[in-house]
Amino acid sequence: MTARAAPPKKRDWSLRSRAVRGLLYQVLALGLIALGVWFLAHNTLQNMRVRGIQSGFDFLTGPAGFDIGELMIPYESLDPYWKAFLVGVLNTLRVAIIGIVLTTLLGTLIGVGRFAHNAIVRGLCYGYVELFRNIPVLLQLLMWYLLLTEWLPDPGEPMQLAGLVFLSKGGLSFPLPVWQAGQALAGAGALAGAVLAWAWSRSARKHFELTGKPRPVWLPALGLVIAGALVGWSLGGAPGDWNLPKSGDVSVEGGGSFTPEFISVLLGLSFYTASFVAEVVRAGIASVPRGQSEAAGALGLSRGQQMRLVVLPQALRVIIPPMTNQFLNLTKNSSLAVAIGYPDVVSISNTAINQTGRAVECIAIIMAVYLTTSLTTSGLMNAYNTRSAIKER
Amino acid sequence: MGSSFTPIAPRPAPVNTEGLLPWIRRNLFGNLPSAVVTVLLVALALWLLPQLVSWAVLKAVVAPNFDLCQAARGSGACWGVITEKHRLIIFGRYPFDQQWRPEIATLALVALLMASCVRACWKPWLVALWVAVLALFFALMRGGVLGLAPVETDRWGGLPLTIMLATLSIVGAFPLAVVVALGRRSKMPAIKTICVVYVELIRGVPLISVLFMASFMFPLFMPPGTSIDVLIRVLVGITLFAAAYMAEIVRGGLQAIPKGQQEAADTLGLSYWQAQRKIILPQALALVVPGIMNNFIAIFKDTSLVTIVSLYELTGAMGLALNSDSDWRPFKIEAYLFIAAIYFAFCFSMSRYSLWIEKRLSFSKNR
């Protein structure tokens, strides 16, 4: 019998070693990508030279030369481009933030409605979800815009509510308090009240943990905030001046106002996203086992307490990550505002591209804005998620 | 003798809990708030429904007659605008006398998609069928073969374009998504980083910026003198966008496969790609079919965005049909409802299918 030959010694630098092959693949992949980037950059530079396109962000300081219909900060057409972009970013953020609040309220309402006792309410909520999530959001935006600009009365003879709120093709006008020191003091007072309310809720919790006797939290807290605001308001001389809108011959004047473009984007995005939020909420509540609320009931908690103390905290863990995704989707979908002329950052960039031809720079600005917003939102939501995640010993 | 037999009183019949009446009692009048809501909602429906029926059916004008529509304005819907313009809305600017070609091509593509949904058809010949049908689709749409008159891609539009963009981008995105998902789980740091950056970058920006890139920047990327059709550029943009989302879905499926599967495959001596192809991916992909279906629905809806970069798919074709015609433009809302119904029909049936397949998958899991 011959002894079996010893297996060949494994060399460290052979192509059969996983580490070496891994290194090889990575170098290959990086090389390919570097080659691709070089190819694209080379072509772009060459094309720019051939077509005489200038590059660089220096155009941002030149005058923009176009008007913007909707402003949150003062802006005139001769202001520099960077200011126009800032107006656009602020408009995007405005519609995104108000939209997120609206869509959360509406979506939660509809998601909870899927569990209603009443069969008609259940059916309506189901119908809402299926109807709104199966039609493209762009189409919904266009439809809202059409409804608001064609089917509403002319600005000369608007629909009105108690002579205070006016709705017409020109948009929605509503009373706005005249900004004085009193309002600022009221805000400060409300903030002080909120701090007191927070201290009260902490002491109430401590008291509960020590003695087992609950103290009311929500009503006193609300009272503290309102009282703080009232004190600040009366310290500021109780200003009561309102800037009221008035119905003029051709348009509604004065007061605060929302343009039809803003309302269409806001309603379109909120109603569309609410159908997804409703599904997220429904899945979250359905994920809490029935035994949890039954056990809570056995402990003597009321239905409201069961929901607030047992079911919701557990459902939130399931709800928050997909909810973050929906908020990000709403923010990204606000870019569709360009289709109906709401001056968001995409719309401003589009105008800037047409005027200056600096497509690369303008698209880079759009992407940077959305990337920043997305990463910030998901960062904040992740922080909240960590707080509400299961605390394991 | 004495007391005579007295049977105890018969028990009352148990409360009926089956059937229509008990259902109504339980679900519509279960408690006081519920009853109030029921009454209010029924009253609202009784007030709204007749108005709706009167607007949409009774007083509606179906004939493509502009004067009749104008007369019925405000009281009845003008479905005449659809009778008049439906071919322009559905086929866009495709030459009018050639529109049988996109019609057949679209029907073939939809039939192929439906066949792909049936499990009995998940056989190797399905791939051949896909190649054949796609070849037929492009032959019919582009012309230039078999004596068909050539039609430039900028004349393509409407529903065929919508379905083609959605289908091709999903088909193209799928292999890319699998590779990226595998790359994201790879132990090689460089490859992992590349995949993470790609996915997060794309998911952080809106589709419209990707489309802007395809339409404004892509021509700059190519060597001078070459020009690529805008349809292909947009298709590449949507595919790259869809692949990032799908990669995350596939990654979810990969994560659900227990580690022991990979280890067992290693023990058997399978190489990395053999293990992925024969052990891991078949299990992971079966798990994520509903997710991929939802992604397909999302992409189908998102194709409406290409109208912003001047491709006339369904939404764009509708705008094209009405914006240039001042007679019919006042009846845009009816046309919007028409294409909304088309989108709804497609998306709703796809989401039903996705639900059905999800149920099938959980059957096999809960055996």
Image (cartoon, coloured by chain):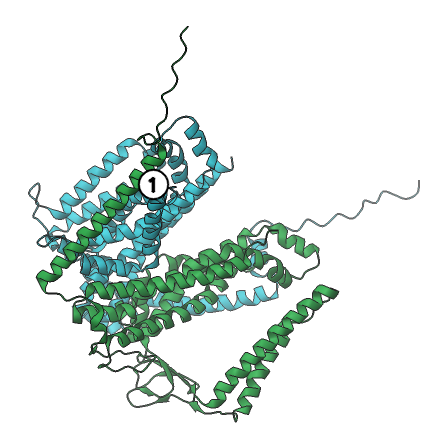
Chain colours: A green, B cyan
Q: Say which quadrant the N terminus of chain A sits in.
A: top left
Using the rendered image of the protein, determine whether residue B160 is visible from the camera's viewpoint. no
Q: Position of residue B177 (x, y in %)?
A: 32, 45
Q: Position of residue A189 (x, y in %)?
A: 55, 83
Residue B217 to residue B107: above or below: below
Q: Seen from this angle, which residue lies furthest right?
A: B1
The quadrant in which residue A31 appears is top left
Residue B162 to residue A68: above or below: above
Q: Nearer the viewer, residue A16 or A29?
A: A16
Q: Nearer the viewer, residue B350 or B327?
A: B350
Residue A226 to residue A268: above or below: below
- Identify which residue is drawn at 42% across, 63% down: A377
Q: Position of residue B260 (x, y in %)?
A: 47, 34
Instruction: Label 1: state its secondary structure.
Output: helix
The quadrant in which residue B110 appears is top left
Determine the chain carrying the residue at label 1.
Answer: B
Crowding at mark 1 (Cα within 10 Å: few <14, some 14-19, many 20+): some
Q: Seen from this angle, which residue lies furthest top?
A: A1
Under mark 1, the amino acid is: Cys
Using the rendered image of the protein, determine whether residue A210 is visible from the camera's viewpoint. yes
Residue A252 to residue B131: above or below: below
Q: Which residue is mark 1?
A: B117
